Amino acid sequence: MKKSIVKLFFCVMVIFLLTACFKKTISSPIEEDNADLLTNAIMDSYYLGQDSPAYDYFHHTSIQRFLAMWIKNETGDINQPIWQDDTFTKIDYVDADLKVMYPDQQLYCCNFSYQNNRYGYVIFAYNATDPSITNWEVKETTPYSYDLNKNINEIRDHLIKTDIDPDSVQARCIYLYDTVQKRADQAIEFTDGKGDHYICRYGDPEFKVEKWEIDK
């Protein structure tokens, strides 16, 4: 009788272990596929600004002198910023309902770095008619670089835990004024085909992603 019980217990344990291994085998590729889908979709949509005329204009030597002057005025000592060209992106100023506050403005953002691991960004409005640029914001963000690509692993790990749809997810760079937290800062907005909105604040060193409810 005891031997039968032992055998039965052993069989149950084997079945349990095989089931667990089987679940892990079939679930891991799905999770990896979702991670790849998320990464490709959000990267492609986030950096669309690099296909704009503003991106080419940004690289004019005279324009970068203006930008460097703005940075020097804001920081006091950074006079030769190193531009992180791959961070260049379109940015929208939005309210608490994630509505664009200045729809008539073409706003762009680019990060810079400086010696001793200092980081920051510049936001400017691009006027295609002249053409010309206008200073909207200069901020030093040391020790953090406000960039999706640089922080993609941490951001994706949080995002994949949400119920966002990886097949329809899109990302955009926003400057968010939060009436609840009473602060304004750069962030990433993620949306999907279901109409869900998620926010990741660059100022949060853990890059947590929170679902954002808006008034419809």
Image (cartoon, rainbow, N blue to C red):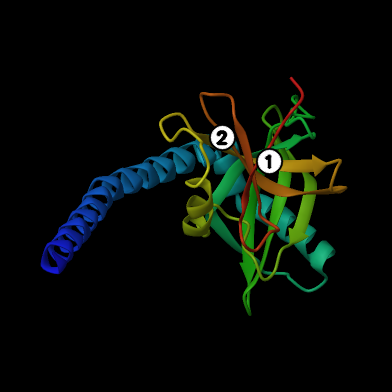
**Quadrant of the rendered image containing residue 134:** top right
Q: Is residue 47 left or right of residue 103?
A: left
Q: Is residue 20 above or below residue 74?
A: above
**Along the line of sight, the residue nearer the viewer: 197 or 12:** 12
As drawn, the residue found furthest toward the bottom would be 116
Per the rendering, the mark at residue 109 is none
Q: Residue at x 47, y 43 (%)?
A: 43
Q: Where is residue 126 in the image (x, y as percent from the top left)?
A: 70, 36
Q: Which residue is drawn at 67% across and 30% down?
A: 128
Q: Position of residue 137 (x, y in %)?
A: 79, 50
Residue for badge 1: 174
**Along the line of sight, the residue nearer the viewer: 196 or 74:** 196
Q: Which residue is drawn at 54% across and 42% down?
A: 56
As drawn, the residue found furthest toward the top would be 216
How far apart in space, not on screen, are marks 2 and 1 (Cα)?
Answer: 20 Å
Q: Which SS class for mark 2?
A: helix
Residue for badge 2: 53
Q: Position of residue 5 (x, y in %)?
A: 17, 62
As drawn, the residue found furthest toward the front would be 1
